[in-house]
Amino acid sequence: MPVVLPEFRSAWSNALEDFVWGVRRNVYVLVTAALCCGLIGYLVAKIRPQRAESYSLVRVAETDAVTGLQKLLQQNDFLARVAKQVNRDPGTLRDTSDTRVWQSQDLVEVHVLALDPDLAADVANAIVQEWLQVSSTGKQVLATAQVRDPALGEQVGTIALLATVAALLLGALIAGLHEMMRATFRMPGDITTRLPVLELGTIPDCRPGKERGQQEALINTSFRSLLQSLWSTGRPGKRPRVVVVASPKHGDGRSMVAANLALAFADTSRWVLLIDTNAHTPSLHNAFSVPNDWGLANVLREETAVDLYDFQHLFKRSAVAGLWVLPTGTGLIDLRSQHARDRLSDLLARARMEFHNVIVDTPPGSVPEVRLFAGSADGVLLVVRASKTTQRSAIQLAQHFSGDGIGVFGAVLNDWRPDAA
């Protein structure tokens, strides 16, 4: 059963959808951060010294009259006369004001920036008066010093608004791009359109908080539906019997899905074996209250023929009717040797004879052990967690199985929360 990989023609629409989702998901954080940035911008603009601008306008006859004025502004005696008019020390005047002049055709503008609006106007008028005293020929004062209103970008309220809008847009861009890079599965239907493999079911959120009876009924219904979908993937008259449950990353809920799927099989009056192959973090023996002092790791290391093991010794009966568990046992599960791989084949062959169905819970990812278990099974059920499992990791895992010629029955969306979609 080869895996069909995504086509590029749908990539842009999916990317846009991910971008919008990322913004929606973080909208409260974005708004809060933007308001904080706006407040900071307001405070900075309020605290920062605001300089007033004053200007005078003089009509001149010469086309280069501004050159002479600029030379005068560089002379200490000229500046001393200007400072005397405004009752300031020349050195202080240089520090507290900034003078700029330029000419447009026959008009010369004298601009003075200072913290005090009155000082800016007095300095501009004084410069013009001293300039006229030096030479008034061909000059006419059209406007005495006037204080210009602050530019829009220099107003406190405008600065705060611009800071808020800029922070909101930048935050939305970052959140949207981050979600595009993650590209997770969020809701039913995403698996088929984005992986895609056949989507076999959706498992709702299992967190505490809902009424226990209602929650259990919802979970049971979801797994019964998953069971029916899994059965429908087989050929007529040949339903899947040995199913490997795999997931790309730790925390996708793979073991929970394997355990509940085994319960769903057992609920149909079938004998079911649940095998735990995750020796690093075994959990199924605790879930079904069976001992883990001997199990799969021991079977793969020992020399006794698998067919000679006593049934009760090899398989641990759980409290659920029709459900047996083969825990990980002691030590690590090592399938590098031919001896271990042969014993695994013998074990699964006996499990097919003893049970109607075998569910194999594997470690996360595509480690060699997972692919060896999957190669001996009828197929793989992928588990992806809503808003957590990335499409990239799921595609990589599916590609590994496809490259090994391993069939993938489909995928199930785990931990779906309608209120978060």
Image (cartoon, helix red, strand yellow):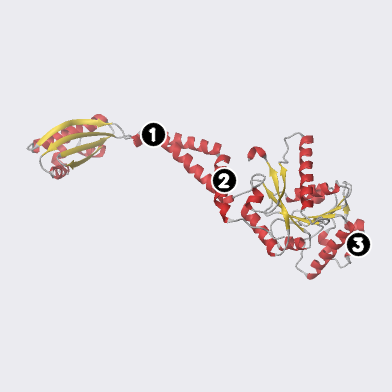
Label 3 CA crowd tier, 10 Å (few <14, some 14–19, many 20+)? few
Whether tag 3 and tag 1 are in contact, CB under 8 A, the answer is: no
Q: Answer above or below: position of 310 versus 43.
A: below
Which type of secondary structure does the marked residue at label 1 adopt?
helix
Report the front residue among 284 and 76. Answer: 284
Residue 21: x and y in percent read 57, 43
The residue lying furthest to the top in this view is: 118
User: Which dot marks residue 158?
Assistant: 1
Three-letter amino acid code at disc 1? Answer: Thr
Three-letter amino acid code at disc 3? Answer: Tyr
Report the front residue among 323 and 410. Answer: 410
Q: Which residue carries the number 2 mark?
A: 17
Which type of secondary structure does the marked residue at label 3 adopt?
loop
User: Which dot marks residue 64?
Assistant: none
- Mark 2 and mark 1 lie on one chain; the one further toward the N terminus is 2
- Mark 3 and mark 1 lie on one chain; the one further toward the N terminus is 1
- Location of the C terminus by quadrant is top right
Three-letter amino acid code at disc 2? Answer: Glu
- Mark 2 and mark 3 lie on one chain; the one further toward the N terminus is 2
Q: Identify the residue shown where x is 92% and y is 64%.
A: 308
Residue 27: x and y in percent read 55, 38
Which type of secondary structure does the marked residue at label 2 adopt?
helix
Q: Is residue 389 left or right of residue 257?
A: left
Distance between mark 3 and mark 1 Cα atoms? 81 Å
